[in-house]
Image: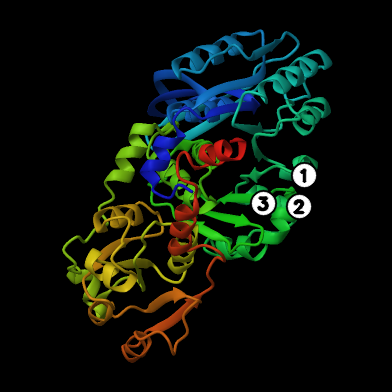
Amino acid sequence: MTSDLLALLTAMAGVRTVVIGDAMVDGYVTGDPAGLGREAPAPVVEVTGVRDQCGGAANVAANLTALGAQTRLLAVVGADPAGRRLRRAMASAAIGTDHLLTDRTRATVVKTRVLAPRQMLLRMDEGSRAPIGPSASAALAARLTEQLHWCDAVIVCDYHCGTFTPEVRAALAASPRRPLLVVDSRAPAAFRAIRPDVVTPNHAETLDLLGLPAPVRGGARVRQMMDHAEQVLERSGANLAAITLDRDGAVIVQAGRPSLRTYADGEFGMTIGAGDTFTAALAMALATGADPGTAAELASAAADIAVRKPGTAHCTAEELRRRLSDTGKLLADGELPRWLTDVPHRAQRVVFTNGCFDILHGGHVSLLSRAKALGGLLVVGVNSDASVRRLKGPARPVIPLSERMRVLAALGCVDLVVPFEADSPTDLIARLRPDHYVKGSDYTRRTLPEAPLVERLGGSVELLSTVDDLSTSKIIHDIHALPRAGEHRTGRNQKGA
């Protein structure tokens, strides 16, 4: 299991992906406002630029390519000027057009947005939305069946523009080789019979899936999604659901595991398709074998980069690498800033947890994500190398302190990471005076020596459930149990001697 996000990003390079779905042109007309028209009270824009970008399934393909995947896009477009515009946009994004099928009876979908500085004035939609014809459907299903033998992951992009006929769905379901299947659809229930591995609905799409009204307050969306986790999986037929909540990050729902939450810290502007960025990065990470929590953290980081850009944006591997390498969250000298220790004037509630975090795994990510949900600021204390040796033995830590801190800081749910030399973080707790102190449920209040101090300082102790069968000690034990190079060969030779 890959838990270091930078190592995961490296491992993702070259992942073979197939995107199938509704490809379209995202057109942009930009200009400066020039008052209202004389003929009607409508805004006048002095046009300064016109550009085309990949939209829909083509934007997912553009994000995959930018993140380093080998990408093939399967889609049906019209034999029209808009189809040629899409091919040019794909070429600019380094996406091959070999698997675009042309249907002369259709008009390529175009969404044209008219933008003035810091404001979208108008969106105009055109193109065919009826189901693709029998000939195009058969050709697309055959092409899909062929490509499923090649790829590591297939991403379904369904925007209700007619691509997913019964014949195309049947090709997805009938393939003897099943790569990772990620469904990004406005109606996830339509793919329930195919049993996708992952669905990535946004909040509105999840409400439609569940038949629920929207909550009154924005923050209530997270709790609402977590409360209905089982229903989301049952109605979508998926093993995992990543529900994107724009400013509120994402909720990751998996059968038999606690729900996770990631956090967004980008500046939301007029970005189109940040959900496509999230889906692309999530699919690539899961295809490499990353656990869902780690994959979602990386996907959220990629989406945060995209939302800082105008238009239909994507995130490149290099941008993501820079983001993960420089988080600004590390307090390497162990000193807590004044704004954090000045409790009466502190603007946010503080959650504190601590540990060795030697080989970060999915259990750690789950605990940290749920700890963050208790308050506004999550501070993580990390045992120094000398402290780990005293607690775990001379063979530990496996990962040095600087690397353990860097990996923790790359998680979106973590706000500050601070080391400590003692075996217990009591000094940090005394200075920090956290509102909540979080540990795993393998502790009790009686076996947690810091509990009386936390409560004496006015904080609460929260014991969160741990993920079964996940621990650094078990991972190390399993690694030692692996056969050494040549052992199997030696055994076969002895058997045959």
How far is disc 3 from disc 2 in space, using C-alphas? Answer: 10 Å
Q: Position of residue 222 (x, y in %)?
A: 56, 61
Disc 1 and disc 2 in contact, CB within 8 angstroms:
yes
Neighbourhood count class around disc 2 (C-alpha, 10 Å): few under 14, some 14–19, many 20 upward: some
- Which residue reaches farthest front? 497
- Which kind of residue does numbered mark 1 sit on? Arg
- Residue drawn at x 64%, y 8% is 80
How far is disc 1 from disc 3 in space, using C-alphas? Answer: 14 Å
Q: Position of residue 107 (x, y in %)?
A: 68, 15
Which residue position holds label 2? 235
Which residue position holds label 1? 192
Is residue 210 shown left or right of residue 214? right
- Which kind of residue does numbered mark 2 sit on? Arg
The label shown at residue 368 is none
Which residue position holds label 3? 206
- For residue 259, which quarter of the picture? bottom right
- Which kind of residue does numbered mark 3 sit on? Thr
Q: Position of residue 177 (x, y in %)?
A: 71, 31
- For residue 422, which quarter of the picture? bottom left
